[in-house]
């Protein structure tokens, strides 16, 4: 049985009642959000001409140019600058696209009195934007988390400077609903990017990531493989790896097979399983240097190229002379997974396009529709609204991480963010979600909200505005650990910067990241309701004296 948390029950009850009338002041923009616009625009964005919108490919460049032209038609201001310093709707971002050579990946383990042991692929893997040739001792650092507000620090009694750290996925006490790490959900500390940045701050030169040995949920690797369940054809052009040229993460991540993991702990007097058990019991540091172990890592990329992609950004200046300095963001991402020749099991070959109608053509056209709605409404919001469609989300949230590092408006005065990513479908069971999270029988009027624990105020505003729309709001994914939903879209880099940011998400379905994610399967009436809810929510926050507060750690607010 599925359930709705108490925080969304009021919305469920009210949605069954007569909807409230929209204020005359907002009605023009509200009614300008139309199914016909969304359908026409998505037919283009997810059409064959854009060839699946692969980042750094012509089809995705065209999608960015289309968004820019729509922002211009709406009469919005360019929010970025071009290479000559002139106003532009396009924020350039330099990326490195690279292809690792697995045969050149080598991890050498050295111990006193023993011959060096060489570990090759597939028992070791590492992908990074540059080649690596580095050596260091080995330190186990638990989950790799430093959370001073919780009195928790995996680095408290070890020195990681110049060392390679070995750390576990996720967070402590994931099966405990009362855990300070958001009970059975995730906090900002659970993602590998945050762990890598923390390792860097402690002087580490690389990190080895291992699954939790006591985990009761599927591993990240298993979850990723389940996305492709049921696919009978082989993509002949692999999805590329891309990274921001000047990304703040500067150390590589290594994964190893369980047999290698056992070897690393062979002379430590303990095991990863015992260490996780101890951490989960007392939330104390159980980190330790692994004695006598020296590691040497070598990696090499077969090919690299540097190219430019673009975040697309436009500004609607606020109407209040003072509050216009403050910003609200509404966002989506314009890229998807491109096209490739494929080979079927019988040897037949043909060309396929991954159209990405829901992911994230729906979010792209949703942002564009909102831009036109705000521009069409005679009354303007008091605070400014930044409309952004990010680049390269599918390659690792690259556009949003870049903008969080290179903001177009000050983050200190950015008050809230609504992110559209997959807002066009009715959620259905799929191999990715089977036995991981329960899906309601009827999702035809349901919207998932992700990030609410970091801003209950924001949620309250959405619930109030939903009285005029009538959606069922659902927070199931706030209690997810296995799927890692919290980190998987463009609101997350801004949550890391303490900005209230919510992801509007209609959920997974069997067509997710498949060639069958097509326009004919989109629920356009539901999309209209979602975009209208965002319109009312953003307008309300833009005009209110007080904006949503950010809760730095959900457990402390209980």
Image (spheres, rainbow, N blue to C red):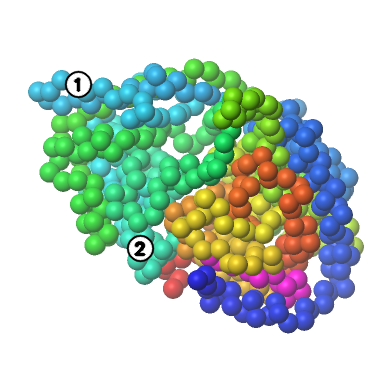
Residue 498, horizontal then vertical, whole percent? 53, 56
Q: Which mark is residue 163?
A: none
Asked if the magenta segment contains residue 210, the reply would be no
Q: Residue furthest front?
A: 346
Give the quarter of the image for residue 356. top right
State how many labels appear: 2
At a point 88% along the width and 45% down the height, the residue shown is: 73
Which residue is painted at 15% across and 27% down in the image? 111
469 drawn magenta: yes
Label 1 crowding class (10 Å Cα cut-off): few <14, some 14-19, many 20+?
few
Give the labeled residue for mark 1: 116
Residue 96 image position (x, y, % from top left) = 57, 26
| In this rendering, position of residue 514 left or right of residue 123 | right
In the rendered view, tell whether residue 362 sits above or below residue 266.
below
Judging from the image, what secondary structure is the residue with disc 1 in?
A: loop
Q: Is residue 227 left or right of residue 370?
A: left
Residue 26 visible in this rendered orientation of the protein: yes
Give 459 or 483, whichever is nearer the viewer.
483
Tell me where residue 450 sits by quadrant: bottom right
Residue 322, can we see it? no
Judged from the image, the secondary structure of the residue bearing numbered disc 2 is: loop
Mark earlier in primary sequence (2, 1): 1
Q: State the extent of the magenta-drawn residues as a range.
A: 465-476
Q: Please state, as top left, top right, bottom left or bottom right, where the C terminus lies in the image.
A: bottom left
From the top left corner, tell me how far across and down residue 292 is, in percent. Answer: 15, 31
The residue singled out by tag 2 in the image is 175
In the rendered structure, are the residues bearing label 2 and label 1 in contact, judged by CB atoms less than 8 Å apart? Answer: no
């Amino acid at each position: 049985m599925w359930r709705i948390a108490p925080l969304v029950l009021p919305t469920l009850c009210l949605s069954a009642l007569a909807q409230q009338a929209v204020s005359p002041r907002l009605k023009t923009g509200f009614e300008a959000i139309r199914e016909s616009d969304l359908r026409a625009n998505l037919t283009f964005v997810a059409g064959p001409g854009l060839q699946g919108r692969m980042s750094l490919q012509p089809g995705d460049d065209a999608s960015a140019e289309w968004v820019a032209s729509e922002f211009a038609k709406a009469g919005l201001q360019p929010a970025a600058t071009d290479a000559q310093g002139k106003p532009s709707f396009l924020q350039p971002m330099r990326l490195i696209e690279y292809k690792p050579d697995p045969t050149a990946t080598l991890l050498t383990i050295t111990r006193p009195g023993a011959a060096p042991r060489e570990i090759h692929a597939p028992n070791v893997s590492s992908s990074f934007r540059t080649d690596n040739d580095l050596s260091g001792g080995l330190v186990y650092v638990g989950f790799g988390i430093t959370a001073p507000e919780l009195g928790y620090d995996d680095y408290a009694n070890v020195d990681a400077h110049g060392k390679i750290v070995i750390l576990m996925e996720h967070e402590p006490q994931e099966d405990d609903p009362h855990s300070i790490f958001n009970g059975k959900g995730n906090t900002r500390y659970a993602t590998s990017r945050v762990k890598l940045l923390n390792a860097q701050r402690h002087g580490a030169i690389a990190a080895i990531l291992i699954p939790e040995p006591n985990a009761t949920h599927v591993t990240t690797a298993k979850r990723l493989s389940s996305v492709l369940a049921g696919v009978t054809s082989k993509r002949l052009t692999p999805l590329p790896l891309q990274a921001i040229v000047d990304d703040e993460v500067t150390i590589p991540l290594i994964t190893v097979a369980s047999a290698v993991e056992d070897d690393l702990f062979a002379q430590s007097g303990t095991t990863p399983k015992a260490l996780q058990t101890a951490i989960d019991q007392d939330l104390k540091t159980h980190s330790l240097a692994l004695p006598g172990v020296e590691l040497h890592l070598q990696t090499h990329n077969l090919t690299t190229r540097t190219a430019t992609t673009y975040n697309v950004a436009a500004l609607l200046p606020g109407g209040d002379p003072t509050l216009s300095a403050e910003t609200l963001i509404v966002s989506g991402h314009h890229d998807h997974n491109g096209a490739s020749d494929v080979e079927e099991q019988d040897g037949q070959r043909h060309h396929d396009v991954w159209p990405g109608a829901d992911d994230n053509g729906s979010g792209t056209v949703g942002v564009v529709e909102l831009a036109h709605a705000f521009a069409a409404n005679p009354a303007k919001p008091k605070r400014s609204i930044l409309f952004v469609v990010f680049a390269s989300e599918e390659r690792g949230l690259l556009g949003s991480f870049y903008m969080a590092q290179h903001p177009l408006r000050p983050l200190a005065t950015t008050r809230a963010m609504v992110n559209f990513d997959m807002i066009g479908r009715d959620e259905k069971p799929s191999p990715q979600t089977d036995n991981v999270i329960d899906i309601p029988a009827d999702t035809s009027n349901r919207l998932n909200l992700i990030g609410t624990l970091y801003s209950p105020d924001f949620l309250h505003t959405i619930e109030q505005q939903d009285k005029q729309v009538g959606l069922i709001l659902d927070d199931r994914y706030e209690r997810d650990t296995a799927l890692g939903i919290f980190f998987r879209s463009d609101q997350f880099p801004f949550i890391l910067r303490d900005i209230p940011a919510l992801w509007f998400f209609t959920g997974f379905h069997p067509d997710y990241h498949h060639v069958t994610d097509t326009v004919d399967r989109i629920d356009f009436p539901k999309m209209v309701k979602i975009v209208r809810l965002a319109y009312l929510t953003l307008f309300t926050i833009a005009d209110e004296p007080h904006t949503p507060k950010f809760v730095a750690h959900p457990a402390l607010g209980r």
